[in-house]
Image (tube, rainbow, N blue to C red):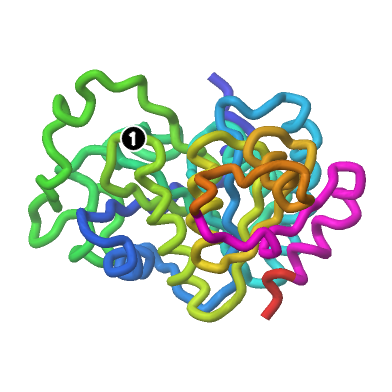
Amino acid sequence: MNPDPDTIGLASPAVFACPQGMPVTVVGSALAAIGLTGPRPVLILVGGAANLDEGVAVRLRPLLRDLVPVLDRLGAAVIDGGTHVGVMALMGEARQRASGCFPLIGIAPRGRVKAPARCSPDCLDESQLPVAGSAGLMPGSTANGGPVTDRRFGSAPERDAGKEPRVALDPHHSHFLLVPGYHWGDESPWLMAAADWLASGARTLMLVAGGGEITRRDVQCRLGQAGRVLALAGSGGTADALVAWRRGEGPPPWDAQSVLDPAMIEVLDWMSARDQLLRLVAQAIST
């Protein structure tokens, strides 16, 4: 069988399992263990996954590809959900095709994902995967000659009982943090904690394209931390709900009791996206 041209010459991603604990206290050692340090600007990408509209994907693909050299020039990192669907797959594809070098970090609940083609399935085997406290170990490494294990993740039957099929991690991401959890959304606080730890005072921006309930919660969390958000108008779902709220044309896309500032949201229309996205991202995360 001929090799996949999109994977030729790519190194295997660095994969690390985060143990149970508060994300803000654990994520720093996990990122350091896979060679990531700050401060650096951070772009958080959230939005449509398997439900991303194909028309939106067609328009988003060249935008993300054009963004790659900007992110490299700024020394930025990108954090997303890491799976091989929707905006995350598009970001991985863009980085690969534009020969990007910036860290592209996928953060996903360990109980919901499966290994990408370039990574051994052992990267999801708790007897093989390094955990915090085993800093520097990569997939398949051992400590003192024995396997690195964290039994707090539970047995395989416990993790998978009654669950939907696992989703593949994207093969074009450079790093993965696999966090405790068996449900989509369990990764959300880890995304925010990782972004803030990597930024360490540098600027961050959340880019929203489409999205559903989990994206809504991600944005709510980020606005609650006074983080800046850029919503792509016309991309559907949560992004368009944010746009309507920002423009005073609709209610907040969450409980009205949430005290959040719509002024932290910037809107970018599809019609001007090709010209404006690069400028807005560069302005938002330049130090």
Q: Is residue 274 magenta?
A: yes
Tag 1 residue: 183
User: Residue 63 at what x, y percent from top left?
Assistant: 79, 46
Nearest the viewer among 89 and 220 is 220
Q: Main secondary structure of the magenta part?
A: helix
Q: Position of residue 270 (x, y in %)?
A: 85, 42
Type of amino acid under label 1? His
Q: Residues within 10 Å of mark 1 (few under 14, many from 20)?
A: some
Q: In the image, is 174 to the left or to the right of 162?
A: right
Vertically, is 98 above or below 284? above
Q: Specify the quadrant of the image occupied by residue 156.
A: top left
Q: Secondary structure at mark 1?
A: loop
Q: Residue at x 53, y 33 (%)?
A: 84
Residue 60 location, x and y as percent? Answer: 76, 39
The furthest residue to the front = 257
Residue at figure coordinates x 52%, y 52% from the top left: 220
Q: Tally the marks.
A: 1
Q: Residue at x 44, y 47 (%)?
A: 12
Left or right: residue 285 versus residue 166 is right
Q: Residue at x 33, y 67 (%)?
A: 24
Image quarter of the C terminus: bottom right
Q: Is residue 224 above or below residue 118?
A: below
Residue 165 lies in magenta, yes or no?
A: no
| 166 up-or-down from 279: above or below | above
Observer able to see residue 39: yes
> For the magenta stretch, what is the residue range?
258-283
Q: Quick check: 55 left or right of 262?
A: right
Answer with left or right where residue 186 lies relative to residue 143.
right
Residue 278 on image: x %, y %:
81, 60
> Visible in this render: residue 174?
no
Q: Quadrant of residue 159 in the image?
A: top left
